[in-house]
Image (cartoon, rainbow, N blue to C red):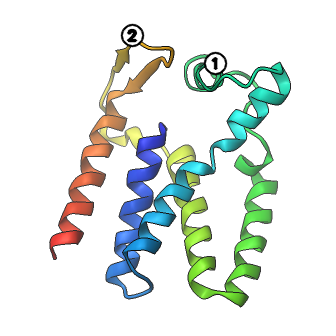
Amino acid sequence: MYPWSHFLFGLLIGEILVKAGLFGQIAAFTLAILAVLVDLDHYLYYGIKHKNWSLANAWNAGSIKHEKGERTFIHHWKGFIVMTAVSAIIYLFSKVAGIIIASAYYSHLALDFCSWNFVGIKGKEKIKGSKFLLDIPKYEIFWDVVFVAGILLLLVL
C-alpha cells in the first residue's frame, strides 16, 4: 500500500491505543510516522542496487514496476523475528517505546500482506503529472476513507 495508507492505519492504531490509555497523542503520531518509515528499505535497496538515489526513480520502481527483490529482509519472516525481538528488548526498557515500535511495524505488515480487497472494489486510479507515478487501487482509497473516519470518530469520542 501507499505511504499515506500506512500513516493513516498507523494513526488509527495509535488512536485506539490512546483511548486504551497506553500513551498520548504524540506517541500515536510517532507510531504513524514509523509505520511509514518501515518502507525506507525499498529506497535503500534501490539506491544501493542502481547507484541512483533519486526518490522518484525508487518510488516508481517499487510502486509501479514492482521491481523484483525490492523488499528486503524486514518485510519477510527473518525481519519479523528480528523486529519482534528488537521490540521486546526495547519494551523491557520503555514499555511505551516498545509498544510504539511493535505497533508501527505490525500495522505496516498487516497492510502489506493482508488481502484488503475482500470488499471487491476493482480498478485503479492512475495519476500522472509529476515524476512520481501513482497507480492507486480503488479499494485502497476506500480503506483510506475508512481509516480517516475511524480516526475522526476516536478523536471526538
Q: Position of residue 74 (x, y in %)?
A: 74, 50
110 or 100, which lies in front?
A: 100
| Amino acid type at mark 2 | Gly
Distance from Cα at disc 1 to Cα at disc 2: 15 Å
In the image, taking residue 1 as reference, residue 144 lies left or right, namely left
In the image, taking residue 117 as reference, residue 78 lies left or right, namely right
Residue 98 is drawn in which quadrant?
A: bottom right
Q: Residue at x 36, y 16 (%)?
A: 127
Q: Position of residue 24 (x, y in %)?
A: 39, 80
Q: Position of residue 104 (x, y in %)?
A: 55, 62
Task: Tell me if residue 69 can be seen.
Answer: no
26 or 6, which lies in front?
A: 26
| Amino acid type at mark 1 | Asn
Find disc 1 in the rendering and name its residue: 57
Q: Position of residue 7 (x, y in %)?
A: 44, 51
Residue 155 is drawn in which quadrant?
A: bottom left
Task: Tell me if residue 4 can be seen.
Answer: yes
Q: Residue at x 38, y 52 (%)?
A: 8
The relative height of residue 80 versus residue 55 in the rendered view (above or below) is below
The relative height of residue 17 versus residue 108 in the rendered view (above or below) is below
Q: Residue at x 73, y 25 (%)?
A: 53
Q: Which mark is residue 129?
A: 2
Q: Secondary structure at mark 1?
A: helix
Q: Quadrant of the C terminus?
A: bottom left
- N-term-proximal mark, 1 vs 2: 1
